[in-house]
């Protein structure tokens, strides 16, 4: 299998954490987002969205990180990260959908507007997008914080795909223009995830890759 990804990509990191957790021999092929390499014809033939990551397994090509993560677990029959129980699977998928639609959608917007743009000289943050993202977090961060009260992980008190998904933008919570101070359960949860073996390993691997200038 081949994972086409961007060094330092938060979405790529969550897939790489799952690959590490499962011990899968997956080749990583890196692309430079800021040089437009995701829009090259050979990549668009794999993923017409011009987004990363994309998984290639023989003649089967799969994009969208949640689908990739679940597929990888199915390939090795892993029932730890993605249990067979219909209720647990539904709960995991519920949180993966929720983070992608709400929490991480907003946090990712702030990370791009306030961090990535400045780093790559892409101009000032879009004030309207920042305001919208902050309003979204105002609504949904309390939901996650309340859920994590007295919990170690999101589902069934064990590390699952839901946690690797939720932690996607956790390194940015102190870098974006949003005050996470009131959400102590979120902060504690993300701190635990930062110490998780395979999440940390994927972060170190990403840091070791060359970045766009």
Image (cartoon, rainbow, N blue to C red):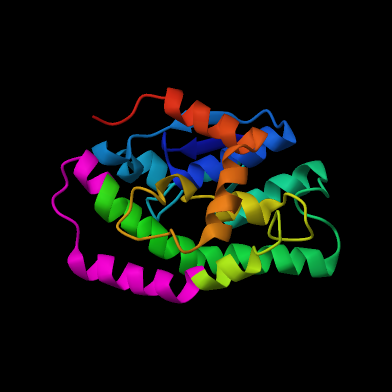
Instruction: Look at 27% across and 65% down and name the residue there.
Output: 130
Q: Is residue 46 visible?
A: no
Question: Residue 152 in the image: x percent, y percent?
Answer: 71, 54
Q: Is residue 111 visible?
A: yes
Answer with left or right where residue 87 lies relative to residue 166.
right
Answer with left or right where residue 148 lies relative to residue 173.
right
| Image quadrant in which the N terminus is located | top right
Provide the major secondary structure of the magenta segment: helix
Question: Residue 125 in the image: x percent, y percent?
Answer: 19, 57
Answer with left or right where residue 129 lies relative to residue 79.
left
Instruction: Look at 81% across and 70% down and name the residue there.
Output: 87
Q: Could you tell me how many numbered marks the image carries?
A: 0
Q: Is residue 139 above or below residue 34?
A: below
Q: Is residue 88 above or below residue 22?
A: below
| Image quadrant in which the C terminus is located | top left
Viewer-side residue, 29 vs 107: 107
Which quadrant of the structure image shows residue 177?
bottom left
Viewer-side residue, 75 vs 96: 96
Instruction: Look at 64% across and 63% down and name the residue there.
Output: 148
State the extent of the magenta-drawn residues as a range: 116-141
> Is 135 inside the magenta-drawn segment?
yes
Viewer-side residue, 152 vs 3: 152
Instruction: Look at 57% across and 40% down and name the residue there.
Output: 194
């Amino acid at each position: 299998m081949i994972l086409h990804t961007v060094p330092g990509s938060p979405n790529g990191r969550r897939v790489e954490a799952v690959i590490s957790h499962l011990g899968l021999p997956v080749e990583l092929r890196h692309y430079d987002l800021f040089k437009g390499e995701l829009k090259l014809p050979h990549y668009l033939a794999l993923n017409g969205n011009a987004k990363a990551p994309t998984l290639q397994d023989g003649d089967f090509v799969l994009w969208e990180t949640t689908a990739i993560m679940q597929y990888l677990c199915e390939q090795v029959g892993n029932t730890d990260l993605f249990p067979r129980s219909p209720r647990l699977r539904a709960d995991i998928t519920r949180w993966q959908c929720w983070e992608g639609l709400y929490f991480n959608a907003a946090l990712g917007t702030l990370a791009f507007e306030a961090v990535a743009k400045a780093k790559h000289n892409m101009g000032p943050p879009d004030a309207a997008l920042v305001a919208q993202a902050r309003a979204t977090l105002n609504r949904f961060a309390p939901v996650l914080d309340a859920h994590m009260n007295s919990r170690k992980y999101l589902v069934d008190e064990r590390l699952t795909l839901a946690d690797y998904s939720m932690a996607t933008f956790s390194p940015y919570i102190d870098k974006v223009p949003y005050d996470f101070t009131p959400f102590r359960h979120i902060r504690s949860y993300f701190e635990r995830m930062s110490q998780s073996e395979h999440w940390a390993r994927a972060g170190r691997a990403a840091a070791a890759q060359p970045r766009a200038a």
